[in-house]
Amino acid sequence: MKGGFVTLEGIEGAGKTTVAAALISLLEGRGCTVQATREPGGTPLAEQLRSVLLSRGAETISPVAETLLMFAARSVHIENRIRPALARGEWIICDRYTDATRAYQGAGRSVDIDLIEQLAKAVHAGVEPDLTVLLDLPVMVGLERARQRRLARGEDVVDRFESETIEFFERVRSAYLNLAAGAPQRFVVIDATQPLEAVIDAAQAALSNMLTRRGEG
Ligand code: T5A
């Protein structure tokens, strides 16, 4: 079986990390080699950029600077990890990719979408997801789940994004739904307010359908 590139998207607390594990288990059950990764991050250098992007420091990071840093991390991630893995026929399950930049920086922070698309073209250089699973849920539900998870872990700091307004996350959620509507062949939208088992079943079914379409089901 040839490899593939699956991305998971959604607002904070949507369940991406949890669903990623279920997709990995499905693929490994079929004998595939799978790498789980995330953005921003996924390599040592890109994880350093993640710390810069998420931590709340003294200096302002403008929306454009934030966008450039996201794409700098993405470029490092693609060239050192994603492209080589795909070339070896492996699978990449990635927690967020450029749709997150379109939604958070484009819709959330009003960065010019043409700039984002130009950077995406240059940075991706052909590395595009085969399937994007969008876990959709109301903003308040996602933020409350993220808060509960923080409490359970004993963490008391919110990162630069988690401290954003409800209106910001509403714009992000709407942008994700618009992206999905514009690319139905790539996106599968799952109602993430369902019990976790139902969300996992739907995500695994989407991946199985994609394998069937590729003649690998
Ligand atoms: N970002 C990222 C950008 O602005 N631009 C970009 O280009 C990129 C790539 C970091 C931040 O960076 C921003 C967006 C982000 O703010 P991140 O690390 O992915 O990105 O941060 P989060 O989205 O905050 O990731 P989370 O880990 O919070 O969310 P997940 O992974 O979606 O949620 P998960 O699986 O950890 O689940 C959260 C909790 O909910 C429970 C889980 O058990 C867990 O406790 N849960 C459910 N409970 C009930 N029912 C369900 N169906 C459930 N699903 C999960």
Image: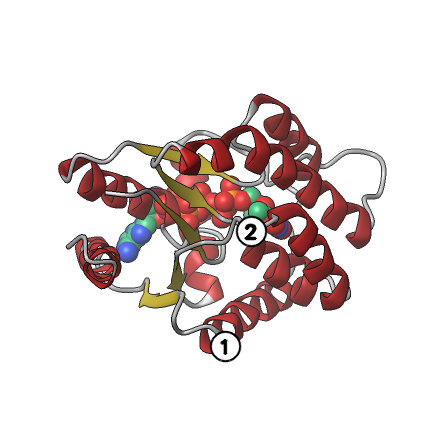
Q: How many marks?
A: 2
Q: CA distance from mark 2 to mark 1?
A: 19 Å
In the figure, is residue 157 to the left or right of 136?
A: right
Residue 118 place in picture, x, y as percent: 73, 59
| Element under disc 2 | loop
Which is more foreground, mark 2 or mark 1?
2
Q: How is the image coloured?
A: secondary structure
- How many C-alpha atoms fall within 10 Å of the one at disc 2: few (<14), some, or many (≥20)? few
Residue 12 place in picture, x, y as percent: 49, 52
Of the pair 91 and 139, the residue shown nearer to us: 91
Hey, what amino acid is under mark 1?
Gly
The image's mark for residue 126 is 2
Q: Residue at x 80, y 52 (%)?
A: 64
Res. 9 in view = yes
Residue 172 place in picture, x, y as percent: 58, 65
- Quadrant for residue 75, please give it: top right
Q: Residue at x 39, y 40 (%)?
A: 92
Q: Which residue is farthest top?
A: 44
The image's mark for residue 182 is 1
| Element under disc 1 | helix
- Quadrant containing the C terminus is bottom left
Question: Is the residue 176 above or below the residue 151 in the image?
Answer: below
Decide which of tag 2 and tag 1 comes sooner along the chain. 2
Of the pair 81 and 167, the residue shown nearer to us: 81
In the figure, is residue 112 to the left or right of 106?
A: right
Question: Is the residue 122 above or below the residue 92 in the image?
Answer: below
Of the pair 92 and 55, the residue shown nearer to us: 92
Question: Is the residue 120 above or below the residue 158 in the image?
Answer: below
Of the pair 139 and 208, the residue shown nearer to us: 208
Residue 213 place in picture, x, y as percent: 23, 63
